[in-house]
Image (cartoon, grey):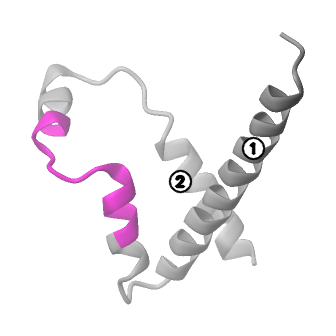
């Protein structure tokens, strides 16, 4: 459980990138895969802890779906 929690923290921190150099920005522009695609590939690999990446993605998807359902209900019941 600790390894999953630490993996989620690492993934969250890696998503909070700062201002990089132009070389880093150019390298990012040349990547053909999105972050989600790279994470999906990683989750399917046999690297230790890779299953935690898949679990974190499923939890994030579930949370996003719940938020979208809540927003949908709020839009439908709003008098404005």
On whether residue 5 falls in the magenta region, the answer is: no
Q: Residue at x 48, y 41 (%)?
A: 15
Q: Nearer the viewer, residue 29 or 23?
A: 29
Circle 1 sits on which residue?
A: 67
Quarter location, residue 39 = bottom left
| Callout 1 crowding tier (Cα within 10 Å): few <14, some 14–19, many ≥20 | few
Q: Are marks 2 and 1 in contact (CB under 8 Å)?
A: no
Residue nearest the viewer, comparing 37 with 46: 37
Instruction: Tell me, for residue 12, which label it has, or none.
Output: none
Q: Residue furthest bottom?
A: 46
Instruction: Work out whether 67 lies above or below 56.
Output: above
Residue 53 left/right relative to 70: left
Q: Give the quarter of the figure containing the N terminus.
A: bottom right
Question: Which residue is located at x 56 percent, y 54 percent?
Answer: 10
Q: Residue at 89% of width from left, 28% of height from top?
A: 77
* Span shown in magenta: 27-40
Which one is in front in this view, the residue at disc 2 or the one at disc 1? Answer: 1
* Quadrant (top left, top right, bottom left, bottom right) of the C terminus: top right
Vertical placement of residue 8 versus 71, above or below: below
Circle 2 sits on which residue?
11
From the viewer's perspective, is 59 left or right of 70?
A: left
**Above-or-below relation of 59 to 16:** below
Q: Pinpoint residue 7: horizontal percent, then vertical percent.
A: 59, 64
Q: Can residue 39 be found in the magenta stretch? A: yes
Q: Is residue 32 above or below residue 53?
A: above
Using the numbered discs, state the Cα–Cα distance from disc 2 to disc 1 in whole angstroms.
Answer: 21 Å
């Amino acid at each position: 459980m600790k390894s999953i929690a630490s993996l989620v923290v690492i993934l969250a921190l890696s998503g909070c990138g700062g201002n990089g150099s132009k070389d880093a920005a150019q390298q990012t522009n040349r990547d053909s895969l999105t972050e989600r695609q790279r994470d999906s590939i990683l989750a399917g690999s046999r690297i230790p802890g890779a299953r935690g990446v898949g679990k974190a993605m499923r939890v994030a998807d579930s949370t996003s779906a719940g938020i979208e359902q809540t927003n949908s209900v709020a839009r439908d019941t709003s008098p404005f």
